[in-house]
Image (spheres, coloured by chain):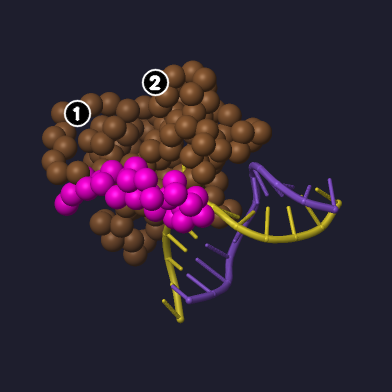
Chain colours: A brown, B yellow, C purple
Amino acid sequence: MLGKVLVHRVEGVGLAGRIVEVEAYLGPEDLASHASRKTSKRARIMFGPPGMVYVYLIYGMHHCLNFVTENDGTAGAVLVRAVEPLDGIEQMRLNRGSGTADRSLADGPGKLCQAMAINLTHNRADACGDRIWLENRGHAVGRVERTPRIGVDYAGKWAQKPWRFRVEN
DNA sequence: AGCAAGATTAGC
DNA sequence: CTAATCTTGCTA
């Protein structure tokens, strides 16, 4: 997943960024994961077939982008936490508003969704469709930093699992 | 039906 | 450190 290029085509324009930071949310018992709320309608998609897009609104104002990863019937998704803008950087600057340093264009889960114009309409979309998808452009993935996940302190022992992966530099 | 809290961010 | 802001999930 790291090093893959996320592409979103909107109105004929391609927005693309290299994925440099992700987090894994695996299994129905992971208290940090929405999948731990088994009755949840929202998280149901995490139990479905892989290759689907899972987008949700957090704190009433930020979107988070995930890709469902595990086989149908097994809960699992990867949260994209940061990308390095490649195509459509001008548009991303517009989406993020003036005064945003290029460095901060998409270096956070909410920021990358704003930069790449990803919102709830992408939820449950097929990540292999013609709207939003992943592609391999042969980027080398160098050293990878591995740490516990961010912002899930409420999840007890699950918060300590080193399931955050970030490309250094 | 009501309420508390969140896989965050920007601004003091 | 804290406000912003609204959907979701839990409780009554």
Q: Which mark is residue A137?
A: 1
Q: Position of residue A23 (x, y in %)?
A: 36, 42
Quadrant assignment for the N terminus of chain A: top left
For label 2, count other residues whose C-alpha is less than 10 Å away and answer few (under 14), some (14-19) or many (20+). Answer: few
* Cα–Cα span, label 2 and label 1: 16 Å
What element does badge 1 sit on? loop
Residue A164: name its quadrant.
top left
Q: Is residue A6 left or right of residue A123?
A: left
| Residue drawn at the location 32% of the way across and 46% of the way down | A162
Q: Position of residue A7 (x, y in %)?
A: 33, 32
Q: Is residue A61 magenta?
A: no
Depth check, front residue: A71 or A161: A161
The amino acid pointed to by label 1 is Arg
| Residue drawn at the location 17% of the way across and 51% of the way down | A169
Q: Which residue is mark 2?
A: A128
Q: Position of residue A64 (x, y in %)?
A: 46, 44
| Residue drawn at the location 26% of the way across and 46% of the way down | A146
Q: Is residue A157 magenta?
A: yes
- A24 above or below A71? below
Range of residues picked out in magenta: A145-169
- Is residue A92 at all visible to an observer of this figure? no
The amino acid pointed to by label 2 is Cys
Q: Is residue A92 left or right of residue A48?
A: left
Q: Position of residue A65 (x, y in %)?
A: 44, 39
Depth check, front residue: A76 or A2: A76
Q: Chain of mark 2?
A: A
Q: In this rendering, do the residues under marks 2 and 1 share a single chain?
A: yes
| Residue drawn at the location 27% of the way across and 26% of the way down | A135
